[in-house]
Amino acid sequence: MLKILGRVTSINVRKVLWALDELGLDFSREDWGLPLRDPKVPEFLALNPNGQVPVLVENGFVLWESNAILIYLAEREGQLLPRQLEARAQALQWLIWQTSELNPPWGYAVNALIRKTPGYDDPAKIADSMTRWGAKMDLLEAQLAKSETGFVAGEFSIADIALGLSVHRWMSIAADKPVLPAVAEYYERLKGREAGARWMGKETP
């Protein structure tokens, strides 16, 4: 059986679990990742030398990096990626953007306001993190505002799964934020999906 290694409090693990739910695939999951189980031990590093979750294991096949896992599952099942080339490329564009551009700015603010990590208590750095994060959210707002379908690439895809969890984190953080009506509608649309509602629960560290 397909197995996922990772703790559900990880946003990257939840990406994969949401996709598996959307696809209706059977799977099992093992808790890995601090504070539950140290992924830096030899047993885990033999599967992913980065010591990061999630990891997919199936019949001797091992795959790490959440976006690679999403693409693999979508390609294997023939779902969750548009068939039309340009729309498919756009979905992958936004999937990559979620990791490379949208997520990095939130680091300080999330550690300060959600995780309550010691040492992340500088108001200026929190404000700077929120400002940079908000600037990226403005780009998503613009894309959604011009979308005729309400999704970033014409139809619901793995890009929306990844972005949905990032939007969930944005909505959950207690801080002054700009009003983003298209993002707010997108958030409700994704929560209206059974799998979306399951994996966009209470934000956790």
Image: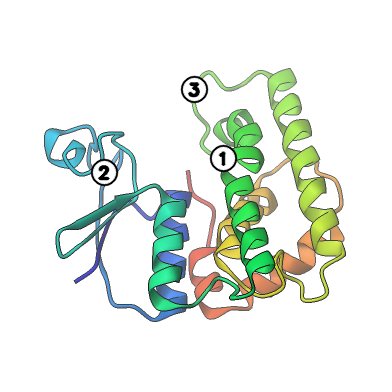
Question: In the rendering, at what x and y percent does residue 4 appear?
Answer: 28, 59
Q: Is residue 98 left or right of residue 138?
A: left
Mark 1 lies on a secondary structure that is: loop
Q: Are marks 3 and 1 in contact (CB under 8 Å)?
A: no
Q: Nearer the viewer, residue 133 or 90?
A: 90
Q: Say which quarter of the image contains residue 193.
A: bottom right
The answer to whether 77 is drawn above or below residue 51 in the figure is below
Q: Earlier in the sequence, mark 3 or mark 2?
A: 2
The structure residue drawn at horizontal position 47% and vertical position 77%, both measured from the top left corner, is 22
> Callout 1: 10 Å neighbours few (<14), some, many (20+)?
some
Q: Say which quarter of the image contains residue 188.
A: bottom right
Question: In the rendering, at what x and y percent does residue 165 appear?
Answer: 57, 57
The structure residue drawn at horizontal position 42% and vertical position 53%, both measured from the top left corner, is 68
Q: Indicate the amino acid at tag 1.
A: Ile
Mark 2 lies on a secondary structure that is: loop
Q: Earlier in the sequence, mark 1 or mark 2?
A: 2
Q: Which mark is residue 133?
A: none
Q: Indicate the amino acid at tag 2.
A: Leu
Question: How many dots with numbers?
Answer: 3
Q: Which mark is residue 114?
A: 1
Residue carrying label 3 = 118
Q: Indicate the amino acid at tag 3.
A: Pro
The N terminus lies in which quarter of the figure? bottom left
Residue carrying label 2 = 36
Q: How is the image coloured?
A: rainbow
Mark 3 lies on a secondary structure that is: loop
Give how far apart the Cα atoms at labels 3 and 1 are. 12 Å
